[in-house]
């Protein structure tokens, strides 16, 4: 296990591109050289590559793809998100943990993540499946001082952060499917579950839970094999989870600061540019009924504006419903009609 001194050594090593002498590290951290040597060995045991040279000292070459807080924090440029990180090798659900942490009042932007969930949750009591150690499963806690109808702006900024990072880091053609999914080649690669507590005029806390398929093979799971994809499936090679995670957290931080300054218009514009539902004929399905039409836009609060087949403009609030984008066949029918 990594100890506090190891984290300090790691932080210092990562701040320098060149070698640092054992003596310098010892002086900086107020520790003995033997303590430094032991710390370096423990870091190597958990997978850090650290080169050593008798005259020059130590140099950090790489850290492993483990989701431990000290590794995540290396080079992480965020001001609000992930200032506090809780990692669990296994947990029931990061959203469940995050909800109780939020009720305890952990700092804004706290990140809860895991390698395996025994009760990974989707919306409406559906399950989120993810084998151990392959994917990204995390929740971020927010205390936005907004009325409840604005809370899904957080889903917008979360989906935009994931989509942009999938494009820039994993180099795959990801798009956002309202209200809470990221798709690649017609298959789901990420799902987002936003939960919150509010009184009538203000949100107390919100938890945004994100599951991203990174290195697992969805075909190994018969329940989701045909509807799901992963970065590995799309690219044919593995992706370092920690690099993707850092990028998402940084993107989220940038957007969250905009959100706090009330600049939602810019987030919405960017979100719309990555949307795969816009302008498409769709069916909105809820427990009680079904509605067909074309997606006209998504408003600032994350609600979908549907133009129904009868020409009516309807606002569909994010909630207990799903959206199906109609297939090519249906487009042609609609165009012809
Ligand atoms: C979602 O629900 O897509 C939200 C999923 C949120 C998961 C994260 S993981 C971290 C955090 N902690 C939690 O406990 N949850 C959050 P929904 O739109 O209801 O979609 C659920 C449906 O997606 C399931 O019924 C399956 O059909 C499908 N599904 C399950 N696992 C999947 C996977 N790994 N990839 C793609 N689709 C999946």
Image (cartoon, helix red, strand yellow):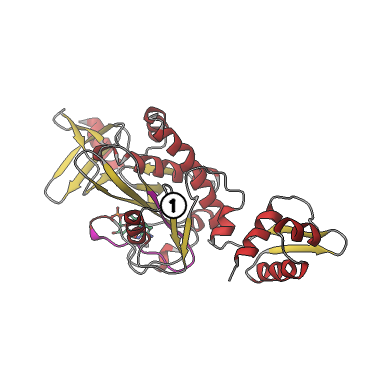
Disc 1 target residue: 110
Q: Quadrant of ligand 1?
A: bottom left
Tell me where the magenta segment starts and ends, as one range. 125-141
Check if residue 55 falls in the magenta segment.
no
Rendered-image quadrant of the C terminus? top left
Total numbered circles: 1
Check if residue 130 falls in the magenta segment.
yes
Which of 289/5 is in front? 5
Residue 254 in percent (x, y) is at: 49, 38
Residue 280 visible (yes or no): yes
Residue 164 visible (yes or no): no
Which of 228/8 is in front? 8
* Displayed quadrant of residue 179: top left
Which of 32/49 is in front? 32
Q: Is residue 177 above or below residue 124?
A: above
| Point 28% across, 37% down: residue | 150
- Residue 48 placement, left or right of 266: right
Q: Secondary structure at mark 1?
A: loop
Q: Residue furthest front?
A: 30
| Point 69% across, 54% down: residue | 12
């Amino acid at each position: 296990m990594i100890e506090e001194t190891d984290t300090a050594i790691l932080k210092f090593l990562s701040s320098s591109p060149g070698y640092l002498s054992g003596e310098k590290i010892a002086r900086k951290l107020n520790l003995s050289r033997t303590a430094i040597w032991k710390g370096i060995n423990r870091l190597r045991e958990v997978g850090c590559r650290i080169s050593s040279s008798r005259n020059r000292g130590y140099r950090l070459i790489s850290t492993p793809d483990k989701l431990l807080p000290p590794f995540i924090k290396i080079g992480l440029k965020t001001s609000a998100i992930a200032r506090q990180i809780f990692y669990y090798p296994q947990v029931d659900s990061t959203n469940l943990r995050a909800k109780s942490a939020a009720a305890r009042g952990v700092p804004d932007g706290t990140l809860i993540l895991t390698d395996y969930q025994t009760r990974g949750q989707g919306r409406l009591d559906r399950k989120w499946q993810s084998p151990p150690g392959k994917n990204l499963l995390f929740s971020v806690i927010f205390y936005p001082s907004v009325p409840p109808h604005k809370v899904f702006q957080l889903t917008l900024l979360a989906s935009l952060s994931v989509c942009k990072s999938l494009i820039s880091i994993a180099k795959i053609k990801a798009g956002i499917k309202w209200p809470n999914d990221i798709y690649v080649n017609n298959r789901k690669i990420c799902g987002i579950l936003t939960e919150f507590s509010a009184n009538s005029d203000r949100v107390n806390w919100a938890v945004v839970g994100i599951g991203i398929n990174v290195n697992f093979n969805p075909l190994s799971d018969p329940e989701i094999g045909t509807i799901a994809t992963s970065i590995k499936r799309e690219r044919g090679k593995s992706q370092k989870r920690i690099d993707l995670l850092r990028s998402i957290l940084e993107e989220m931080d940038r957007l969250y600061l905009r959100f706090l300054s009330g600049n939602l218009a810019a987030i919405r514009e960017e979100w719309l540019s990555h949307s795969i539902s816009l302008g498409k004929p769709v069916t909105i399905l809820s427990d009680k009924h079904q509605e067909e039409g074309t997606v006209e836009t998504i408003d600032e609060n994350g609600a979908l504006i549907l133009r129904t087949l009868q020409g009516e403009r309807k606002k569909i609030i994010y909630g207990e419903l799903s959206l199906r984008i109609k297939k090519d066949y249906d487009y042609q029918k609609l165009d012809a009609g």
